[in-house]
Image (cartoon, helix red, strand yellow):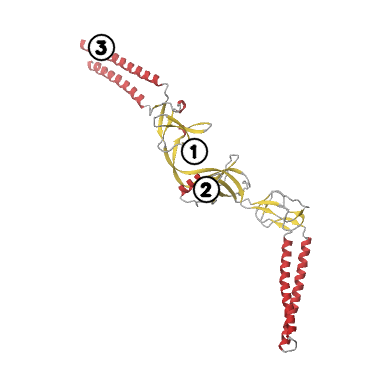
Amino acid sequence: MRKNIIIIIAIISALIFGRMILSGIAKATSGKQRAAMGTPSVTVDTVKSANVRREFDAPARVMAKYRVEVLARINGYLTKSYFKEGDFVKKGQLLFEIEPQEYTNAAGQAKGNLENARAQQEYYNKQLARYKELVDNDFVARADYDNVLAQRNAYRAQVQSMENAYRDAQRNLSYTHVKSPVDGRVGIIDVTVGNYVSMNSGPLTTINSSDPMYITFPLESKDYAELNRIDGTPNAKREVEFTFSSGQKYEFKGIQDFYDNRVDESTGTITMRATFPNPKNVLLQGDFGRIKIYSNKNDEMPIVPQSATMENQEGLYVYVMDDNNNPKLTYIKTMGQVGTDWVVYEGVKKGDRIITTGMQKVIPGSPVRVVETTVQDNNLNSKKTNIFQRLINKLKKIFGGNK
């Protein structure tokens, strides 16, 4: 019995001593923590990469595939208009009438002249046949035959001239009815009915074709070079998307099918063009917006977690750890996302070390305390638990053995 009491006293003493040791450890740890409170704790991760479809952004302008100025091709008074401003018209549809009477009369006169010349030619054709028979039988002189032949040839040439004059008169008469040269939408009427028009009067109106529509955009030469590198050819047909200046995205996608043969020296851009369907006539000549052009093939690009980024007036940024393990504020440019990660095309590269948590208290260039995980704290608690558990188990074993 006395032996057991001594053992119990020893165990209690050990518990008290262990408690004192653990308390000292805790105080020391707490002191270190207080000392480190001025240094923000952060976690750091390495920038990874992903194969993504590249996209490039540029300002854009809508253009009609055909933009035609409707002009008067003859002189005269504008007598009729057969459409309203803003109407959609078909190729060949009648738009205006220019007073036709003068040109109808001219065509009639040219036709009469032609018929007279043909009649004279026919007469001399018959005369020539008779004179040939007479001259062959020596009933008339050769000179008479040659005279009839010359008259016939003169009227033959006159018939050709009259035919040309009649065709010109008919052509001018057709110009009195001004027709649409293309399918499209009519703009403002610049000259109203009653005005005298001529070939020098300027456009009567303008017609813009509406479906399909062109959208042109100046792409930076470095982006153009990147597209060619990714796709392996400058002649690829690439998918494009258009967004209006209001921020609304156009519902149909287009195909980039043309690029200029030179780089603009003043802007460092190359003009490219895409063709868009426009069945609802939403795209209008001269409208502005922005365009995104996509590569046909994927490219390996750096990605960073969205949670590792912050933003200010200058843009999106991350903290990159430098060679001295100090954070450096670095602005990044993104081009979409993959899951919860930003796809970055400028600012960081694969393998860079960035801060992923604790960025709020970080001061660029000031030291930080890198904390990988909370495993160390959990291990400390586990050690405490294990010590007390072993002591309790020992007590249970002693007292349990006396029963």
* Residue denoted by label 2: 239
The answer to whether any part of residue 225 appears in the image is: yes
Mark carried by residue 9: 3
- Distance Cα–Cα, label 1 vs label 3: 69 Å
Q: In this view, does 346 lie above or below 263?
A: above
How many angstroms separate mark 2 from mark 1 (CA)?
Answer: 20 Å
User: As drawn, is 286 to the left or to the right of 370?
Assistant: right
Q: Nearer the viewer, mark 2 or mark 3?
A: 2
Q: Distance between the residues labelled 2 and 3?
A: 84 Å
Q: Nearer the viewer, residue 97 or 172?
A: 172
For the N terminus, which image quadrant? top left
Whole-percent x and y of residue 145?
A: 73, 83
Where the C terminus falls, by quadrant? top left
* Sequence-first tag of 2 and 3: 3
Residue in view at x 66 percent, y 53 percent: 68
Front of the two marks 2 and 1: 1
State whether residue 369 is above or below residue 190: above
Which label lies toward us, 1 or 3?
1
Residue 130 seen in the figure: no
Q: In this view, does 118 lie above or below 217?
A: below
Q: Please say if the residues under marks 2 and 3 sit with CB atoms less than 8 Å apart.
A: no
The kind of residue on which mark 1 rests is Thr
Label annotation for residue 334? 1
**Dot 2 crowding, Cα within 10 Å, few <14, some 14–19, many 20+:** some
